[in-house]
Image (cartoon, rainbow, N blue to C red):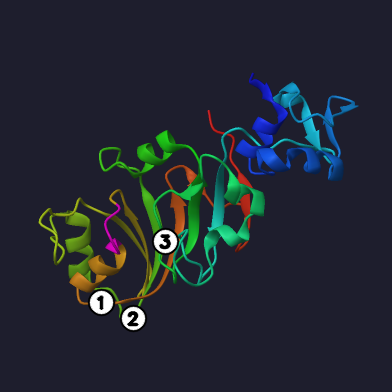
């Protein structure tokens, strides 16, 4: 349980700044249990607060999104940013939410967004071997030799000095595969397929670790309850 000033919760969770808290309380129905609050300095329990009959956002926020194509995983780049698909207040949280790893602009699928630095480190650490599963559509039929190279491990990508770990691969049809990797190198899947004389024409991440896209449509997201 966490108790602090109401304006502290409102600013931390991105609803408004501390300076705007009094105005926010006039516009929105903020209640501590059944009692409406107008004093931003009142100390309250996070779990007892509602805003316009909705519970207060979690103190720590992690979401799973089905990323659409042509959306950029960045706070700064040009183009449509992934954070624009979320409630505006989430972009004002402190600490800031960020994607855990990235998906390329033209890649769709499972991506996590969180303000939990420890979770981010855990899921992106090369020592953790977190599996990522991709559905890959190829320009050319995949050969048996290419499958052996990718699944055996030891392939060294251009510009890298360290060989790749073995990947798991399921062939769906001649030009479609499921590829599971535990590393997260720059443009890894595209570079892997390029190294075996093929080209990725469509890339979709089915899952990231234990998190899959069941029940989500393109552009949708859900808040995760993590232990």
Give neighbour class at mark 3: few <14, some 14-19, many 20+ (Cα, 10 Å).
many
Q: In the rendered view, tell whether residue 26 sits above or below residue 216.
A: above
Assess whether mark 2 and mark 1 are in contact (beta carbons under 8 angstroms).
yes
**Residue 185 lies within the magenta run:** yes
Q: Residue at x 84, y 38 (%)?
A: 53
Q: Secondary structure at mark 1?
A: loop
- Judge from the rendering whether residue 81 lies leftward or rightward of residue 200; answer left or right: right
Q: Secondary structure at mark 3?
A: loop
The alpha-carbon separation of the residues under discs 1 and 3 comes to 20 Å
Say which residue label 2 marks. 139
Region of the chain picked out in magenta, as a range: 184-188
Assess whether mark 3 and mark 1 are in contact (beta carbons under 8 angstroms).
no
Q: Residue at x 24, y 68 (%)?
A: 191
Q: Secondary structure at mark 2?
A: loop
Say which residue label 3 marks. 103
The alpha-carbon separation of the residues under discs 1 and 2 comes to 7 Å
Say which residue label 1 marks. 198
């Amino acid at each position: 349980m966490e108790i602090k000033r109401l304006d502290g919760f409102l600013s931390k969770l991105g609803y408004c700044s501390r300076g705007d808290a009094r105005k926010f309380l006039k516009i929105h129905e903020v209640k501590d249990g059944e009692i409406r609050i107008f004093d931003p300095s009142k100390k309250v329990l996070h779990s007892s607060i509602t805003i316009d009959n909705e519970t207060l956002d979690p103190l720590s926020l992690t979401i799973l999104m089905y990323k659409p194509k042509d959306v950029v995983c960045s706070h700064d780049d040009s183009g449509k940013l992934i954070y624009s698909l979320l409630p505006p207040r989430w972009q004002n949280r402190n600490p800031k939410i960020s994607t855990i790893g990235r998906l390329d602009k033209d890649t769709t699928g499972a991506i996590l967004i969180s303000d939990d630095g420890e979770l981010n480190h855990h899921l992106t650490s090369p020592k953790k071997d977190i599996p990522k599963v991709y559905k890959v559509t190829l320009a050319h039929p995949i050969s048996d030799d290419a499958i052996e190279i990718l699944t055996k491990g030891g392939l060294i990508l251009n510009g890298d000095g360290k060989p790749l770990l073995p990947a798991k691969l399921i062939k769906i049809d001649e030009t479609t595969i499921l590829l599971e990797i535990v590393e997260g190198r720059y443009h890894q899947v595209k570079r892997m397929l390029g190294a075996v004389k093929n080209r990725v024409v469509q890339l979709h991440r089915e899952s990231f670790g234990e998190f899959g896209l069941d029940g989500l449509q393109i552009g949708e997201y859900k808040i995760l309850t993590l232990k």
